Image (cartoon, rainbow, N blue to C red):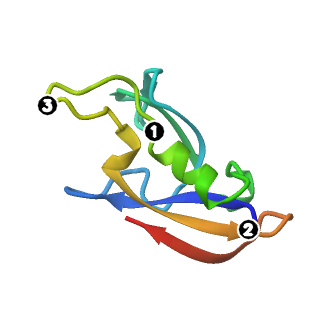
């Protein structure tokens, strides 16, 4: 069953403008901008509308995107910008309406 990714909020810290949003596009190898125009270390485009979110073929495909990395941080660990957030993988019907959620935190 297809799934979408919804950002719940940051693992640590204050709420962000991405909280509650669904992912349209994520690319850790490109620089992006937050909704308020601040530069970010990755490209992350989101929407509040579940029907506009990217549909992944299954939860494993979505998890692979969530764990994508670009290079290595100074501490030697992979640079995985999206793991800054808690996300939920939501199963969707073919019309895009969310039917259930599976958390990945």
Mark 2–mark 1 distance (CA, rounded to whole Å)? 25 Å
Using the image, determine if residue 77 lies above or below residue 94: above
Numbered mark located on residue 92 in the image: 2
How far, Cα to Cα, is label 1 from label 3?
29 Å
In this rendering, position of residue 6 left or right of residue 41? right
User: Does residue 84 appear to the left or right of 77 in the view shown?
Assistant: right
- Sequence-first disc among 2 and 3: 3
Residue that badge 1 annotates: 35
Q: Position of residue 30 (x, y in %)?
A: 47, 21
Asked whether residue 50 is in view, the answer is yes
Where residue 97 appears, as percent x and y from the top left, is: 76, 70
Image quadrant containing the C terminus: bottom left
Residues at circles 2 and 1 in contact by the CB criterion of under 8 Å: no
Alpha carbon of mark 2 to alpha carbon of mark 3: how far? 37 Å
Which residue is more in the foreground, 50 or 89?
Answer: 89
- Taking the spot 44% from the left edge, 44% from the top edge, the residue there is 67
Label annotation for residue 75: 3
Instruction: Identify the element where label 3 is drawn.
Output: loop
Q: Is residue 98 left or right of residue 18?
A: right
């Amino acid at each position: 069953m297809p799934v979408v990714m919804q950002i719940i909020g940051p693992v640590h810290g204050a709420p962000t403008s991405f909280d509650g949003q669904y992912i349209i596009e994520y690319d850790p190898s490109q620089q992006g901008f937050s909704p308020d125009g601040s530069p970010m270390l990755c490209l992350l485009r989101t929407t509040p509308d579940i029907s506009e979110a990217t549909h992944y073929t299954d939860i494993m495909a979505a998890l692979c995107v969530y764990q994508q990395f670009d290079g290595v941080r100074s501490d030697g660990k992979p640079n995985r910008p999206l793991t800054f957030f808690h996300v939920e993988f939501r199963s969707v019907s073919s019309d895009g309406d969310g039917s259930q959620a599976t958390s990945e935190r």
